[in-house]
Amino acid sequence: MPIRDLPEAPTSLHILGPGLLLAALGVGLGETYLWPRLVILFGPEIRWLFFIGVTLQGIVMLEMARYATATGESIFFGAARLWRPIMWLFFAIAILVYIWPGHVALGAQAFESLTGISWYIFAIAGLILIGIIISFSTIVYNVVEAILSTLIGILVIGSSIIAALVGNLGFVWATITGLFTFGYFPQEAISGPQAAALFPLIVGAIAFAGPSGMQQMWYTLWLRDKGAGMGTYIPRIKGLTHMDEEETMPSRGFMFDTEDPENMRRWKGWRRWVHFDAWVLFWGITMLTTIIYTVLAQSAVQIDPGVREAILADDQGATLDGMSGAFAQAGGAVIGGLFFVFISVIGWKMTFGIFDAFSRGQADMTYYFIRPLQRFGMNRLYFAFLWFLILFGIAMLFVTGEEDGPAAILDILSVLSTFAMGAYCLLLLGTNNLLLPKKIRPNIVINILLAFAALFYLGMLAYSYFRFGVII
Amino acid sequence: MVTGFLTGLLVGGLAAVAGAPTGYIIVAALGLGIPLAIFGLVYDVLLDAGRIPFGRIAPTALYGILAFPIARLVQELLLTGIFGQGITLQHESGVLSFLVFQGIMGFGYGIGFLMIHSQIIEVSAWLAYRKQAKEEGNQPRTAEKRV
């Protein structure tokens, strides 16, 4: 890699950063439905697994950032440097997992419950809106950051207020103490007639603790466009209307001189910035929102015991309806309706974030490793993937009958998603220990934690498969 | 300076308790909205005076932890005083546990407030910066505008 100076890290630690984007993207199905559901099923003690899951994701995030800030390259490029088929594997997984419009459909269904208007209309309008917003932006990253941070802000404020009006201190206390009951595992999920159904449920929920699937890998692309570390030297994705301003993309990333004390001082500054991003913005905000949603689920069950039945039956639609109904009983129709608005916001923002990130990742791999397509430039490839997703999503919504339900589409994500998480932990062990200069490689503790994370995700999948014959 | 006021007022409006008599709804919405708007205003004044650093989490979270329970208590006391029934205060074991719970939710409120508030300030500052750069005929340096 060519050597250039590492830019100075920002001195002030600010709330708006790629870590907040990852939290905004990550707060979704797991935090608002799967984990509250596990709490209702097994009690708040099960939440220590969430704690472990999100903490491991924090470590993964630091390591993703290590590679991206040191080189300006995405983790996909790193994978290709190790062995190109690894990168193509992630390319394929991304397509299989993320082309389905499941999240926007989930959000649109919540909107249908609120307004009575068919969810198809909201889903299609939501998809087109994503295309329009991104196409007409100047710098795509800035717009994505602004929209996702605002929506997560509205979500955090709104759900805090609903929880403040329906919850109580006992629920918060149970939720927080449950985070530290390390080692608790419900007996019925290991043995007994229910185990084959319950164990995979826990595995799925762990995979959905924080950013699931490939979201962490996309974080490296957001870091690059934020201009973090050596990413400053890489041009950014611009909107369709600003295509003429596209800068030439270098053929590879850059490295700084790790023997130079000044560059190493700046590196330490960037690591501080990344730690703040990972622990305060990502870990803290993910924990906060999930605590609030667990309080909401517990309150809903207390207000209306019928919600518990819907949760136990794993009927997501009925659960959300029930929770909204319970809040309406306690705080009035506005509060009940607002709950649906928040679920819609979650569905749309996840689709928005995923569509942007997916297109970034696929465009990055296509641009660098399918040479004949390089002449189109990174920007055009990005928009080709984005509009393909939008049009494919609209087509899928037309062919998917309501009987199958959007929730059924979401289930497809689970297995490959968890596999990708285990696989990228192994990938990080390779990229950060083999490709980076010795001075900036992760220490032994981080390496052990990464190996543990790989074992955690892949081991649970394998155990679930061999013990119960089902994966998730 | 109005950012905090408006944010607080809007958020307070969310607390409109529907299904109840109109008078109850109005008192519930304004009872939370106005105190939060006043706290939002105070926040902006402190920000302008340089007492609170822009975009920093800890001071704003602390602001939420302190301001939100007070605003909620005002709302509950108003509702109880006028209509004889609050929203959740009567279900709590005591005022202290009520305040502690609202304080924890206030932490969430503070963080959410900061995200939206920072975004509004950031966007308006960026637009002003762009305008100035355009007028001076030079674009900001890449590294400066990106992080």
Image: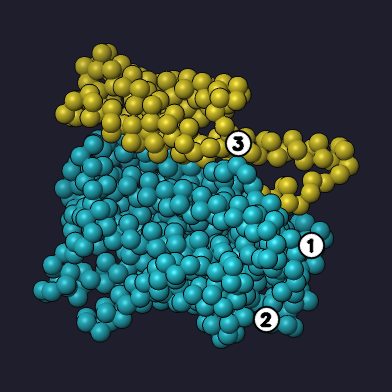
- Given residues A140 and B48, the one toward you in this image is B48
Q: Quadrant of residue A401?
A: bottom left
Tell me the CA gap for discs 2 and 1: 20 Å
From the image, state whether disc 2 or disc 1 is nearer to you.
2
Q: How packed is label 3: few (under 14 Cα within 10 Å), some, or many (20 or more)?
A: some
Quarter of the image with the C terminus of chain A in it: bottom left
Q: Residue at x 62, y 35 (%)?
A: B121
Q: Which residue lies under the disc numbered 3?
A: B120
Residue B65: image location, x then y, percent? 38, 31
Residue on which the image places disc 2: A369
The disc labelled 2 sits on which kind of residue?
Answer: Phe
Q: Nearer the viewer, residue B41 or B83?
A: B41
| Residue A132 visible in the snapshot | no
Q: Say which chain is cyan.
A: A
* Between A273 and A160, the one nearer to me in the picture: A273
Asked which quadrant contains residue A335, the reply is: top left
Residue of label 1: A246
**Mark 3: which amino acid?**
Ile
State the residue at coordinates (42%, 42%). Answer: A156
Above or below residue B91? Residue A415 is below
Does label 2 or label 1 sit earlier along the sequence?
Answer: 1
Residue farthest to the right? B137
In this image, A233 relative to A145: left or right?
Answer: right
Question: Which chain is tinted yellow?
Answer: B
